Amino acid sequence: MALVDEFLQSGEIGGLDIVKGAQEGIKELSKLADLHIVTSRQHALEDCTKKYIENNFPGMFKSLQFGNHYASSGKKRNKSEMCQDIGATILIDDSMTYARDVASHGIRAVLFDLDGTYMWNKGDVPDNCARVTDWEQAVATVKQMLSS
């Protein structure tokens, strides 16, 4: 946990690479629905997260929701709770844990597994969930979910 805290406090999290196709995919989805960010990041990372989003996805998100997971203090909220609070009907996430959480609350999930390389989200996807391996698939899946 100390290594995670050290990385998070280093500021390097604000310089993370953007996944190929993410900017184009988010831009396209933002024309179809109000988009919100629901993140497990700690409240201590709000400033660098907001700056990263403003620099890379300007004007594409209506709000940022912070779950404050893994923090040593402060209120924590799970992703299903945050999604319910904002009225979200679909969550795109790379965590099987969070996909299962929201799916168990009737919220559809798009499980992002970049080129099949995300070892932490392997296994059978729950009902109300679809696995995708790139942003083109993510956009197509969200469009299909929105139309059904």
Image (cartoon, rainbow, N blue to C red):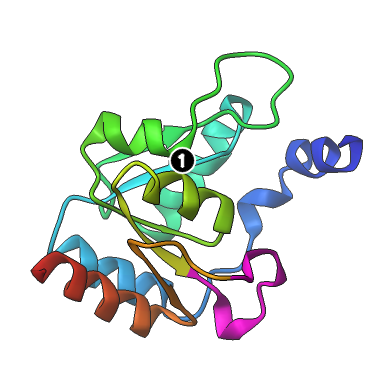
Tell me the SS state at disc 1.
helix
- Name the residue nearer the viewer: 88 or 53: 88
Residue 128 highlighted magenta (yes or no): no
The quadrant holding residue 104 is top left
- Name the residue nearer the viewer: 43 or 84: 84
Q: Quadrant of the N terminus?
A: top right
Q: Quadrant of the C terminus?
A: bottom left
Q: Which residue is mark 1?
A: 50
- Residue 81 percent location from the top left of the image: 38, 31
Q: Residue at x 57, y 51 (%)?
A: 97
Residue farthest toward the top in the current orientation of the protein: 74
Q: Residue at x 38, y 51 (%)?
A: 103
Q: Residues within 10 Å of mark 1 (few under 14, many from 20)?
A: some
Left or right of 70 on screen, residue 4: right
The quadrant holding residue 139 is bottom left
Residue 47, compared with residue 59, is above or below; it is above
Q: Residue at x 38, y 71 (%)?
A: 23
- Name the residue nearer the viewer: 53 or 87: 87
Residue 49, compared with residue 109, is above or below; it is above
Q: Which residues are magenta?
A: 112-123
- Residue 7 percent location from the top left of the image: 80, 44
Residue 49, compared with residue 144, is above or below; it is above
- Residue 143 percent location from the top left of the image: 18, 73
The quadrant holding residue 120 is bottom right
Which amino acid, mark 1?
Lys
Left or right of 45 on screen, residue 110: left
Residue farthest toward the right in the current orientation of the protein: 2
Left or right of 75 on screen, residue 148: left
- Residue 74 percent location from the top left of the image: 60, 13
Residue 62, compared with residue 65, is above or below; it is below
